[in-house]
Image (cartoon, helix red, strand yellow):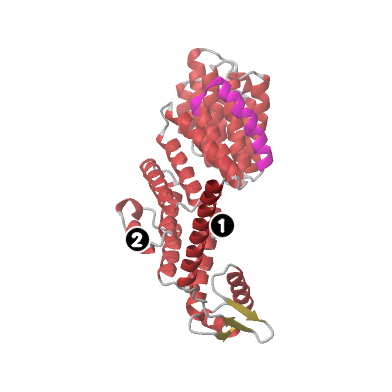
């Protein structure tokens, strides 16, 4: 970067655009920003130079230089309106987020900007940077720090009645409580976000985020039909905006169909016009799970989990529900296999279901304790003994009810006779 500045004019910007490579363009733009002129035209040109410089640095993955740029621009921020400062700061933070592997840098950058905005008394910008910092801490699984930050921020924003920011923060709080497995608080925060959203115009992306979070919470409560409708709304919103979150909404839609025993519908949803452009590993993973579930095959199910580990096991929401689905499928298969027997070797059952003996034995003991069937494990002989279901004669409950009613009649007659005698 050369020390001499270039005048902040459209000619200088054009020179940067016509440079032979990105490094030369970056050098020219740095020199434009150093122009000491503070005229209205010069300031406008510098803003354009900052935008172009941010784009070039992002393309070159120079995250540290973007961070230094924010520090370097602080004197310039005192010359322009606060709204423009906020736009530039948030733009540079967004640019850093586009560079892979910069989560720690983003957190430290946001903390620096929070300190600066607090010193400069720029409340509007500080609140938005703090909200961004809380989102980054949530992604980094630093839940305690994120919760402390959000708790103070929510009180402050509610006092100012900034509805749009409040929707963002309430949504973040809902996601945070969900990550901490606190469903009642997650639902309460989501309700607060919806209430704030109803009072203002909410951008489609924001509405899609609310619907996505609603679907996740309903799915967690096993209300998969309602969850599906929310995921569908989120998918339509994200699909219209070409938002990458559309694929997650589609994946969760397919998951809901599988969980409500409608795995046959998955192929139809995938082949629909809106879904076709998202065909890829995520959709293939859900299709493999749906096929395994339709065939009631644990072997195919485990193959799908193994082949699509990144798409299934590394997605916490899908993984949680598929674990429940796997247990249900395993129980159904075991019940079907042991039905013809009164006594059967555990090893034989394990061989038929193609699982390890220890896993089958553990699952059978759990099913007995849960009263899924009547039986006992003879571990010495390595056998499962299944008892016949004791059929309760219908006459016994009827007899008890009759005796109970006769008792009530006798008591009533006794009370009446006592009154007459008195």
Residue situated in front as seen by the camera: 61 or 4? 61
- Asked whether the residues under the numbered discs 1 and 2 touch, taking CB atoms below 8 Å apart as contact, a structural biologist would say no
Q: Which residue is mark 1?
A: 314
Pointer 2: residues within 10 angstroms few (<14), some, or many (20+)?
few
**Along the horizontal axis of the image, is 47 left or right of 240?**
right
How far apart are the two marked residues, 1 and 2, measured between alpha carbons? Answer: 25 Å
Of pointers 1 and 2, the one earlier in the residue sequence: 2
Image spot of residue 256 (x, y percent): 43, 55
> Marks 1 and 2: which is nearer the front?
2
Of residues 9 and 221, the one drawn nearer to the viewer in this rendering: 221
Q: Residue furthest left?
A: 273
Q: Confirm whether the magenta stretch covers residue 216.
A: no
Q: Please state the horizontal and vertical placement of residue 263, each as a whole percent of the image.
A: 39, 63
Residue that appears at 34% across and 60% down: 265
Corner quadrant of residue 138: top right
For residue 134, above or below residue 374? above
Q: Quadrant of the C terminus?
A: top right
From the top left corner, tell me how far across and down residue 20 is, in percent. Answer: 49, 38
Identify the residue at the far top of this view. Answer: 39
Residue 2 visible to the viewer: no
Mark 1, residues whose alpha carbon is within 10 Å: few (<14), some, or many (≥20)?
A: few
Please name the predominant secondary structure of the magenta segment in the image. helix
Q: Which quadrant of the figure contains the N terminus?
A: top right
Q: Secondary structure at mark 1?
A: loop
Magenta stretch bounds: 143-164
Mark 2 highlights which residue?
Answer: 265
Query: Which one is in front, 391 or 349?
Result: 391
Say whether residue 261 is visible.
yes
Residue at 68 percent across and 26 percent down: it is: 115
């Amino acid at each position: 970067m050369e020390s001499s500045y270039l005048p902040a004019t459209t000619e200088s910007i054009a020179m940067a655009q016509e440079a032979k490579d990105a490094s030369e363009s970056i050098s020219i733009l740095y020199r434009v920003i150093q122009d000491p002129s503070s005229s209205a035209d010069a300031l406008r040109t510098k803003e354009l130079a900052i935008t172009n410089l941010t784009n070039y640095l992002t393309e070159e993955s120079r995250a540290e230089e973007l961070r230094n740029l924010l520090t370097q621009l602080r004197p310039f921020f005192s010359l322009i309106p606060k709204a423009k400062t906020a736009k530039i700061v948030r733009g540079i933070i967004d640019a850093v987020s586009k560079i892979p592997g910069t989560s720690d840098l983003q957190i430290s950058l946001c903390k620096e900007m929070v300190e600066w905005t607090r010193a400069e008394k720029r409340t509007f910008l500080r609140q938005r940077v703090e909200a961004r910092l809380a989102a980054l801490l949530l992604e980094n699984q630093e839940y305690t720090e994120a919760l402390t930050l959000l708790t103070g921020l929510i009180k402050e924003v509610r006092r100012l009645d900034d509805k749009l920011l409040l929707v963002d923060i309430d949504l973040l709080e809902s996601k945070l409580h969900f990550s901490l497995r606190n469903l009642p608080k997650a639902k309460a925060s989501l309700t607060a976000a919806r209430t704030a959203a109803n009072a203002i115009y909410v951008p489609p992306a924001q509405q899609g985020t609310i619907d996505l979070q609603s679907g996740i919470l309903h799915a967690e409560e096993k209300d998969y039909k309602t969850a599906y409708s929310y995921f569908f709304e989120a998918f339509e919103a994200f699909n219209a905006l070409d938002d990458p979150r559309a694929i997650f909404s589609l994946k969760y839609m397919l998951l809901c169909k599988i969980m409500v025993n409608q795995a046959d519908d998955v192929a139809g949803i995938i082949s629909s016009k809106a879904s076709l452009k998202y065909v890829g590993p995520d959709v293939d993973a859900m299709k493999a799970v749906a096929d395994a579930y339709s065939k009631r095959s644990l072997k195919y199910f485990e193959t799908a989990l193994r082949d699509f580990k990144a798409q299934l096991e590394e997605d916490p929401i899908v993984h949680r529900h598929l674990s429940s689905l796997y247990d249900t499928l395993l129980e159904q298969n075991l019940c079907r296999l042991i039905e013809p027997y009164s006594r059967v070797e555990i090893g034989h059952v394990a061989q038929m279901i193609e699982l390890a003996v220890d896993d089958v034995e553990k699952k059978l003991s759990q099913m007995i304790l849960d009263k899924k069937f009547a039986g006992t494990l003879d571990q010495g002989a390595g056998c499962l003994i299944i008892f016949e279901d004791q059929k309760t004669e219908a006459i016994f409950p009827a007899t008890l009810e009759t005796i109970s009613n006769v008792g009530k009649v006798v008591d009533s007659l006794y009370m009446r006779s006592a009154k007459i005698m008195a």
